[in-house]
Image (tube, rainbow, N blue to C red):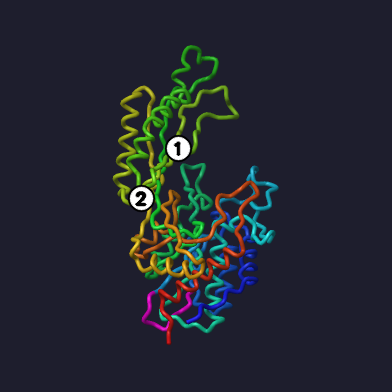
Amino acid sequence: MTAPTVNRERLVATAVDLVSISSPTGFEQPVGEYVREVFRSLGLQVLWQEVEEGRPNVVGTLEGTGGGKSLMFNGHMDTSYSGREPWLLGIAGFQPQGFVEDDHVWGLGISNMKGALACYIETVRALQDAGVRLRGDVLVACVSGEIEKAQWGEEYAGREWRGYSAGSRFLASHGGIADMCILGEPTSNAIVTGHYGAVWLRISTHGPFMHTAYTAGRLEENSIVRMHDVIAAVREWIPEWQERTTYAGEQGIVNLGCVNGGFPWRASRTPERTDLFVDARVPPTLPMTDAVAELKAMARGLRDRFPEHGIEVEVYVTAPGSEIAEEHPLVQSLDRCHTEVFGSPPPRATVRWFSDASSLTRYGIQSVNYGMSSGAHGAEGENLAIDGLVQTTEVYVRTAMDLCGVAS
């Protein structure tokens, strides 16, 4: 059967619409309302899940005739930034206002991952336009809170900090289930068969809290100075972790994400505590309990090495990785359909970023990341080539027909 035709202009219009609705993490509802109306206009069965106030998941289901496998297209509605950050002001490609220039769609979130949401919607429209009835269901799940961020302590508490698969965890535990899932994260159309997870931990040093006037001869007791010793020791340990967590030819990785100590408005006091925040990437083959145990053992070693530093450790993110077998029908179908559209097989990739496949696979929904991207974001902002959006949608259409089956 000839594959349905993708409507280029309609796809671009949807992408521009989605980008033009601001939706930083915690404030996804306006995009949810938009896609709900689109799903209703297409006659889809609509499921609205309120993850928390102002944060929905919206699932549109194109119901099949029965007897086929179900396929979910899953994508997050939240964007990594708001566009109001000082370093993004005045950069059009990092603003929640979509536009077309040089055969690309530009704007905040087009790559990660509103372009994919537009491709999903056009996939359903193309199937409907061609009168194709599938045996299995196709679900388009637009979820809240995927971006890699997490609340911590009292200062960073609230919905805007609740990411790391908050929406997809709720989705799968409240009826959002399918046999398999495609996540259109920006992979440059490579099939990602495995990705790392993460453990985030706080390592703290302590020292006396006192006025500057009384610190003469006691600089080494300052918790910031003591943190220098800890950072040096952690840097010595990082190569060991990187080697320990090598997976699928990719070496593990550790990031020193933040140092926090003292009061900028009161530099006349020494800080009682200084915090180092560490992001250690964890391969899907390393159980999360083992990873946490190893990281805590590293922290205990710091205490033994620097007993006077008052070192403590807190783990506050545990986000497992995900993998799928090369032989899985989802991988094989994407491989065939990509080859039909692009003329050559897609590459495979292992990545060290996180995706909602982590949560979905825990519910038995085998998932793969495959989507379009234009490479790393440049100084001009996020953008996707329109030709690439069209071709990616063509792959999605063919894959849905292949996996769900076409009713006679």
User: Which of the two residues, 351 or 93, is positioned nearer the viewer here?
Assistant: 351
User: Which of the two residues, 229 or 27, is positioned nearer the viewer here?
Assistant: 229
- Tell me which corner region of the image, top left, top right, bottom left or bottom right, holds residue 365: bottom left
- Residue numbers of the magenta segment: 61-69
In the rendered image, residue 180 lying in the magenta stretch gets the answer no
Q: Which type of secondary structure does the marked residue at label 2 adopt? A: loop
Q: Position of residue 13 (x, y in %)?
A: 65, 68
Question: Relative to residue 343, is residue 209 depicted above or below?
Answer: above
User: Which of the two residues, 237 or 161, is positioned nearer the viewer here?
Assistant: 237
Disc 1 marks a residue whose amino acid type is Phe
Is 377 displayed left or right of 301 in the figure? right
Q: Which type of secondary structure does the marked residue at label 1 adopt? A: strand
In the rendered image, residue 62 lying in the magenta stretch gets the answer yes
Disc 2 marks a residue whose amino acid type is Ala
Question: Relative to residue 66, is residue 209 depicted above or below?
Answer: above
Q: Secondary structure of the magenta portion, mostly?
A: loop
- Rendered image: mark on residue 277: 1
Q: Position of residue 69 (x, y in %)?
A: 38, 75
Q: Which residue is mark 2?
A: 248
Point out the frontmost of discs 2 and 1.
2
Tag 2: Cα neighbours inside 10 Å, few (<14), some, or many (≥20)? Answer: few
- Tell me which corner region of the image, top left, top right, bottom left or bottom right, holds residue 12: bottom right
| Sequence-first disc among 2 and 1 | 2
